[in-house]
Amino acid sequence: MAKVSDNLNQLGISSTSRSKITSYRSELRANGNDLQKNHINRANEDPRAIVRVMEENTPYGLSTILMLEAGLRADDALNFSKLTLNADNSLYVEQSKNGLNYTTVPLNEETAQRVAEAISNQISVNYGEYRVALKEAVKSTGQEWKGTHSLRYDAIQQQYSNGMSLAEIALYSGHSREEISLHYMK
């Protein structure tokens, strides 16, 4: 909502209620505005460097790994009570965005063991603290800050380049629709 509020303020609109935002979006589309034409690819140049910095310098390394390797949303990667580790090392994510439940791609054995421990310890990470640490990590690697969602872009683009179909990506990332997964492509 903060991004929507910023964008609306730039357009001279100061209301941020959900119904107002929805009506503005509908009105802009009705007037022929293509709200997707300014799509920004939020993928990072070197996401592994970001993960290394987060692992070495913060307590948030595992959350960063889950965003990059499993394509989790930040909220899902920060709240381990939402996660169940399956026998094949995939994660079952409960109550993700819009209340969706989904299963991720399988994790490597080391990451799966770390996740099992975090679930057992009921780890929950503060989003604001994570965001600040991630932003500092990105900048320390000489890359442009593109938001916490950038690691999800990296994960989805990597899955696609490894031969996963848009339908599979939609399934494993909790999108449920291929056109949403397509949004993450370059």
Image (cartoon, helix red, strand yellow):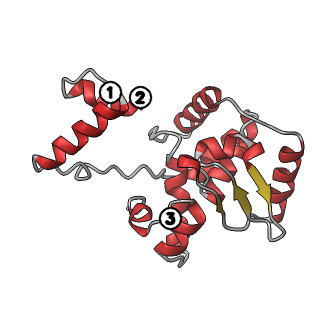
Label at residue 176: 3
- Type of amino acid under label 2: Ala
* Disc nearest the viewer among 2 and 3: 3
How many residues crowd around disc 2 within 10 Å: few (fewer than 14), some, or many (20 or more)?
few
- Judged from this view, the residue extending furthest toward the front is 19
Q: Name the residue tied to disc 2.
A: 2
The quadrant of the picture occupied by the C terminus is bottom left
At horizontal 72% and vertical 47% (from top left) the residue drawn is 82
Q: Position of residue 118 (x, y in %)?
A: 84, 44
Looking at the image, is mark 2 or mark 3 earlier in the sequence?
Answer: 2
Q: Where is residue 16 in the image (x, y as percent from the top left)?
A: 34, 26
Label at residue 90: none
For the residues labelled 2 and 3, say whether their Cβ atoms are less than 8 Å apart.
Answer: no
- Type of amino acid under label 3: Ser
Label at residue 6: 1
Q: What element carries label 1?
A: helix
Q: What element carries label 2?
A: helix
- Type of amino acid under label 1: Asp
For the residues labelled 2 and 1, say whether their Cβ atoms are less than 8 Å apart.
Answer: yes
The quadrant of the picture occupied by the N terminus is top left
How many residues crowd around disc 3 within 10 Å: few (fewer than 14), some, or many (20 or more)?
some
Q: Distance between the residues labelled 2 and 1?
A: 6 Å
